[in-house]
Amino acid sequence: MNSYCVATYRCFDEKADFNKKALGIAVGLTVGSWTDLPEAKKAAMERHLGQVISVSVHEPDGPGETAADRYADIEIAYPDVNFSRDIPALLVTVFGKLSMDGRIKLIDLSFSEDFLSGFPGPKFGMQGVRELLGVHDRPLLMSIFKSVIGHDLSTLREQFYLQAAGGVDLIKDDEILFENRLTPIERRVEACMQAAEQAKRKTGQKLLYAVNLTGPTFNLLDQARKAIASGANALLFNVLAYGFDVLSELSRHPDITVPIMAHPALAGAYYPSPYHGIAANVLLGKLMRLAGADLVLFPSPYGSVVMPLAENMAIKHALLTEQAEDYRFSGTGADSDNAVSKPAGASAGADGKRSTLTLQTSFPVPSAGIHPGIVPLIVKDFGEQVVVNAGGGIHGHPMGTIAGGRAFRQAIAACQAGIPLQQYAAQGHAELQAAIDTWGIKQ
Amino acid sequence: MNSYCVATYRCFDEKADFNKKALGIAVGLTVGSWTDLPEAKKAAMERHLGQVISVSVHEPDGPGETAADRYADIEIAYPDVNFSRDIPALLVTVFGKLSMDGRIKLIDLSFSEDFLSGFPGPKFGMQGVRELLGVHDRPLLMSIFKSVIGHDLSTLREQFYLQAAGGVDLIKDDEILFENRLTPIERRVEACMQAAEQAKRKTGQKLLYAVNLTGPTFNLLDQARKAIASGANALLFNVLAYGFDVLSELSRHPDITVPIMAHPALAGAYYPSPYHGIAANVLLGKLMRLAGADLVLFPSPYGSVVMPLAENMAIKHALLTEQAEDYRFSGTGADSDNAVSKPAGASAGADGKRSTLTLQTSFPVPSAGIHPGIVPLIVKDFGEQVVVNAGGGIHGHPMGTIAGGRAFRQAIAACQAGIPLQQYAAQGHAELQAAIDTWGIKQ
């Protein structure tokens, strides 16, 4: 019995026969040719043949739409037998050549159980990160260094301490801090973890420091080992600059004993166009989780570098869903007519029962433009399972960086208690009040 | 004295103050903040500060243009001291966060001499590939397997022989052929190289077989060693699925003793949008050559999967230019006003003299939609320094695959002799005549 991974494309064309186009994809990206094969050969090749699952045409008859808005969403099932169990093989198969074929965007991926079984997924995941921190009952708070380039160890150490002392749960390196003479990774980790210890004596809380893993690809594992040996308890990684497979191999490696935080650097080269690229829920959602990211940063819908809320919610769903059916395609090769039998309940497994995804969840980290007055919106959109991530909203607090952290923790506490921010601030929370006076409350 | 790498962006915005935006990029992606730094600190930080080189605003006053067409081309110089000598560090610096900031596309990159010196470039390059083949005086001819998935070794061997016997110089694997039970890489190489020997006895000519290098990233070097030990004399690599750095590390590794052919799979996720992504000349031109690709495939302007001719010519230029100034930014940090002094002659080095780029050239391989009747166009656009690459145009020849190769070699010979194809075909070149009868001649 054949199993398949399924790619969904949105394909724009003013006059294409989309059914014909879908068939062309299914054949062209698998066995190459079909109708001219002898019947005997067809029988042998059928297990390698791609299958058209669905074609939904959107005719441009809405108000303001023109012929250029005509598109179809096309689902193609690719036999697992055609590719190895790695993300480069899957992406090259489903969107290698096809990405260059006109106005076409990869908008979803589903995986066969067999393909999924090749991916252990996040080693820690959301629950694992919570366990490391001992915090289970509220959104986490993360802080980003204000500026790091050109600064020495003592300056970074001081910045780190001020962030930690305000009560943040995680601190991340700037993603543009590479190996450099002023703050090489081992000494940076040592200095920052000392500052973390110092802050812990004051706050009593644990903290994860995600140090930026950089340099030549074939040296990353050694670099990570060095960082961990120096005391690093998390890693930051620019996944898209290195490829999903590197994350996948790092995350599953037994020597990587700390969570990996995926940074979305370069993601804007892929997701924003409606006509080209790879949708955010695939790029920063499903593939990041599959490759083993324990936390995933992505542009929030709240600041200046924005992503629409609907796309944020699609990423959140991809990172947090526990329904196997959201990741899995359970159709099987049928006996005839080159058709794949799709299970009756589209959201249920082959046996009709819902089941739990074996991949751990990844912590969503909507980023950019976050200040304490936005926390209620974040909680409304994401619930408790979110990392509130701020840079300027902490360092720019009028009472200083420590107060910046406190104002966020107060905002989070207010949300947990179900008390409006303004009212909570008035109950003697001066740092939150000052933050509200500075940035307001976003509704 | 500071040295810089320079990124050029095309940034669309209906009403932005582009000078302010440029300054925001230059500061925000380097030192983080500037105007609020104390003067003493500024002196220390100046060497880390990004610099605005130029801002050219295009106001939408042309026929048919609307406010949405307003853009600026912005050049920003990034101090080398801020990043390590690898492509991920450079890309994350210049287009990491920025890629997600509205309608902005990375359209060019220039490198400092210091940054360039970290990259040996193509190990063979165009000349090296010609020397391996012993062919110096004509465009090369490459053939692509017709279909490979689901076929066994003997079928591949036969396909290989038919291609080789027609007189092609290079044969490449299909990029979607991964490690599989039917044709594992070592046995595939052995079978195909035997077929190459057999054909050589007939044609007398050498041949390179680019076998697809696939699988987990950290295993690629071993996989390449196995292929080379089995007789592989070239490698095909899906660069964008793995990241430029992997190509860079493979190409410079002493154990990789064969040319690497870069496949553009997934490139369409980056280059086609005018508003987002990375331009083709950067993605498939400069970065491929910098990372060490000896040959680079890209969509031709001739077939159904098309790239505009101007973009093809920009890629060709990036792969073939020997002018150092096309790759190098020679501006230096000035003493005051945060300005970078740009050399007077924009296309000359700091000393005003032109100089030769140390990187070897990469062979351009425009691909898709190629038949013998297109060869004169290819030669017109690319000159002799090109690989004519065909799949269907060889296998689909009415007299068979061997005749398909011969027809192309005849078309190339006609161009070299300066004889129109039709006339050359009439001089007793039946294979070319049959090709013209089938596909015509494209003007």
Image (cartoon, coloured by chain):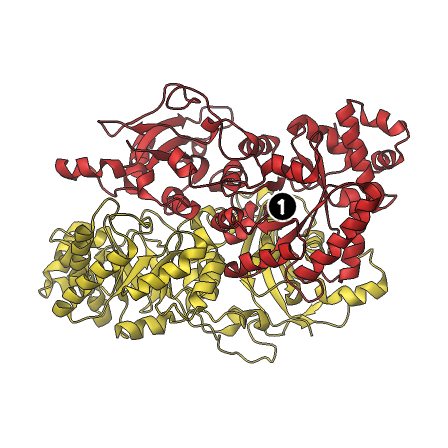
Chain colours: A yellow, B red
A427 lies left or right of B54: left
Q: In this view, does A353 lie above or below A290?
A: below
Q: Nearer the viewer, residue B345 or A255?
A: A255
**Relative image position of residue A28 (x, y in whole percent):** 70, 54
Q: Identity of the amino acid at label 1?
A: Asp
Which residue is identified by label 1? A101
- Label 1 SS: loop
Quarter of the image where the N terminus of chain B is located: top left
Quarter of the image where the C terminus of chain B is located: top right
Q: Nearer the viewer, residue B299 or A136?
A: B299
Residue at position x 59%, y 74% in the image:
A345
Q: Image quadrant of residue A412?
A: bottom left
Q: Which of A272 and B344 is in front in this view?
A: B344
Q: Image quadrant of residue B325?
A: top left
Residue at position x 47%, y 39% in the image:
B275
Residue at position x 60%, y 51% in the image:
A96
**Relative image position of residue A49 (x, y in whole percent):** 72, 62
Q: Is residue B335 above or below residue A98?
A: above
Q: In this view, does B363 lie above or below A323?
A: above
Q: In this view, does B375 lie above or below B264?
A: above
